[in-house]
Image (cartoon, helix red, strand yellow):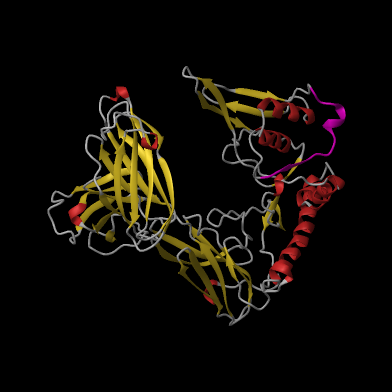
Amino acid sequence: GGLLEEAIRVSDLFLPGKKRIVSTKGTVVSSVHDAKQFFAAEHLLNIPLVLLINRGSASAAEIVAAALKQNERAIVIGEQSFGKGTVQTLWDLKDGSGLKLTIGEYLTPSGRSIHNIGVMPNLRLIPVTVPELKNGETELGRQEIFTTEKRFGLLSDFDAENRVNDLDELSISYLSHTPILNEESKIIDNNLKIEKLKADIFVKTAEQLLSQWNPKNTNSVIQKISREAEQKESEIITEALSKHGIDWSLNPFIKSATPEMLILTWSAEMISTDLLRVKVNLRNSGKIDAQRLIAVTRASNGILDSLEFPIGKLVSEENTSRTIDVKIPAGMMEEQEPVEILLFDHNLKKLKSVRRQLHFSPKRNHSFWLRMKIFDNGRFGSRGNGDGRVQTGETIALAFKIENKSKSTVPELLLKLRGTEGAFRINRGKLLLKNLEPHKKQKDYFLFKSLMDSGTLGKISLEMVDIKAGTPGIVYLWNLNNMFPEQKLVTPELLGVSWQDKDGNYVEAETDLSSLILQGNVSNVNDVRDVYVYLNNKKVFYSLNRNSGQQDKNTEFHFQTEVNLDTGNNQISIFSRSRSG
């Protein structure tokens, strides 16, 4: 990044007079900045110039890159830049706070916006990653099981859905080694820095371009260097893949495999509470050898998206498989996730795809026994008249004892106290209880103050969240005018939740229908107050249990509604509250 003024000054050093550097466009500010040669020296206007950018180059850095590239003053190499092209201003507000306001956008010399687009280099450098083998071990001839921490990245810069064949685009795919964690924070010897720079492909490519500089035939120089470097790097990548038993060699004289020849299947299973094993199987039933085959996942969930299964060469009548173990995060909620596996050939042409629905369940369903007691007599930092009741102006200690009534240990239970009505100051409102074992109790306390001018005692809420389970949180409400009861708090259990069309046919997570029937049940009807449903953060359904407290506790509360879906992805959340909130 940097400042606009400095970007203009740097660009002015290398551009002839009257060449456009940048313009700004907006309702509040519009301006044009051309080169005026205020700072330029004669020799700077003609020296060879190569500019290095990557995906972190933003704002003012992009202005310089675009100005020098589009005025054909420099060759830009590297990665597509970040794409921050907005003009912003800061306003001081009366209360001492500030407001950052976007008032316009930057336009390149050709009149294009930088924002969300960035600058495309003349020569793209595309990193490719191949997991390294440990201690010189060889995996050749053995089926490896990779993890999301040890995975391939052969198509890291590839968008299968929006790919456009650009014959003029020049690029070099190179083998990138994963940087050591916190490497940037270490003090590195100057000689080592020099060696690292000499080995850096950005620097090496820039040196080649400068050494072969030909201002009259720049494109041919870039093409020659990219062709030679691409061939050399391809051999390095092929060698790295061969250590994993993957034949990535390419014979240009062999015809491409047809989709009909290849039989693609895949499976996914939870092999532990937090590990999903995804296995891709491929068979070549044709008479032609297939080359550089690779399968890739596509999913809206980033955990499952862009997983790569390089197959390489698959000879006639051969079967092979690739496996990746995906670590599922602790807090992942219950959901249906559509996942598609796409198969590509050596030209990155999609041959076929197979789509499946994966269902993820929460790791635990909990129940807790909770007892609370108010202190206003000086204990736990409280301050009041000591009558054990909440009154305005008092600092209240809300002590509690909690017992885990479920069958599994809760590694981390987060408790958050909030004021929902009235005026409060929460002094101690967030607690993290660790390793709450089954039928074991833990004690702690909250501190809060009901302010003098609130007019009412109001209400408070306690939210209980198992951070590493993905189960819905328990939210418990209290009116401070009432005493705190001893309660057993249970996570509402949703049973038999399903989607159907209007004819009663069951529907999976994906559909082209504009509306669906949602129905399900909530356990322990006697304690259910209500159920409500949100669609994309908008409440679309509410059902009150009018017989709460009057029925058999083993009965279930049924709900059903028609949901009109939005275009694109729809996130549906179902909430249930007990009689106590």
Q: Is residue 221 visible?
A: no
Q: Is residue 99 left or right of residue 233?
A: left
Q: Is residue 115 left or right of residue 33?
A: left
Residue 311 vertical position relative to residue 18 in the rendered view, above or below: below
Image x and y of residue 571, in percent: 37, 50
Quarter location, residue 288: bottom right
Image x and y of residue 111, in percent: 62, 33
Q: Is residue 24 left or right of residue 438?
A: right
Magenta stretch: includes residue 52: yes
Nearest the camera: 109 or 446? 446
Q: Is residue 482 visible?
A: yes
Residue 158 vertical position relative to residue 536 in the rendered view, above or below: below
Image x and y of residue 439, in percent: 34, 60
- The image quadrant where one finds the N terminus is top right
Nearest the camera: 323 or 42? 323
Nearest the camera: 21 or 539? 539
Quarter location, residue 538: top left
Q: Residue at x 36, y 40 (%)?
A: 417
Magenta part of the chain: 39-54
Q: Residue at x 43, y 61 (%)?
A: 338
Q: Residue at x 36, y 59 (%)?
A: 509
- The image quadrant where one finds the C terminus is top left
Nearest the camera: 146 or 87? 146
Image x and y of residue 491, in percent: 30, 54
Residue 221 vertical position relative to residue 233 in the rendered view, above or below: above
